[in-house]
Amino acid sequence: MRVRFAVTHRLSALVVVLSALTSSCGTDAEGGSFNDCASSQFVDRTAASASRTIGYGGASGSTLFTYSPRCITIAAGQSVTFSGGATSSFGVHPLSPGVLNSPRAGTAGNPIQRLTDGNMREVTVTFPSAGTFPYICEAHASTGMTGVVRVQ
Ligand SMILES: [Cu+2]
């Protein structure tokens, strides 16, 4: 019981610190400024017929070290597919929620899970509710391999 209390307490402290860090970076609930996704950069893929594939590693319009589109707007309940096509995988481009060094940045409950499996090229993630959900490639985030799924 004593140990469990200590762990819980530490996690709460971490959340407080992360919240403080996030707000001090000038981000907001709308989240336009996460991962260099300014409001004007979001592509609207809310239409039922729209493609909601984010290519990476050379697939679907991306280059080797970018996502395409990086900043995407979808509607609640829709899904996004992160695809490395025939050649790339999450082993080369580990997918992770949040921003560099802050996996919990953005709206709480980011449905994007960390993936590092080299045998996995594609994943489809459903976003049940509205929010701003940043994501990064852990290997190349520092050179701009980052993005945001904005759910409205
Ligand atoms: Cu990468």
Image (spheres, grey):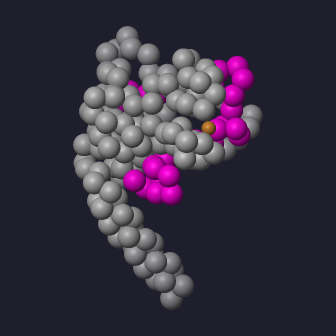
Q: Quadrant of residue 134?
A: top left
Say which residue appears at 50% left-offset and 52% top-offset.
100
Tell me if residue 30 is in the magenta stretch: no
Question: Where is residue 52, by image quadrant?
Answer: top left
User: Measuring 38% from the left and 70% from the top, which residue is drawn there?
Assistant: 17
| 7 w.r.t. 72: above or below | below
Of 108 and 67, the residue lying toward us: 67
Q: Quadrant of the C terminus?
A: top left
Q: Number of numbered discs present?
A: 0
Which residue in the rendered view is the most extreme toward the top? 49
Report the span colored magenta: 76-105
| Residue 118 appears in the figure | yes
Residue sitting at 54 percent across and 85 percent down?
Answer: 3
**Residue in front for this viewpoint, 86 or 70:** 70
Q: Extreme right residue here?
A: 119
The kind of secondary structure the magenta stretch mainly shows is loop
Looking at the image, in which quadrant does ligand 1 appear?
Answer: top right
Return the x and y of residue 32 as percentages of the image width and height. 29, 40
**Is residue 84 highlighted in magenta?**
yes
Q: Position of residue 43 (x, y in %)?
A: 35, 23
x and y percentages locating residue 2 in the rendered image? 51, 88
Q: Furthest-bottom residue in view?
A: 2
Position of 60 relative to 31 (above/below): above
Residue 6's spot in the image, x, y percent? Answer: 48, 83
Corner quadrant of residue 86:
top right
Q: Left or right of 106: which side holds 136?
A: right
For residue 129, say whether it is visible: no
Q: Residue drawn 33% across and 49% down?
A: 107
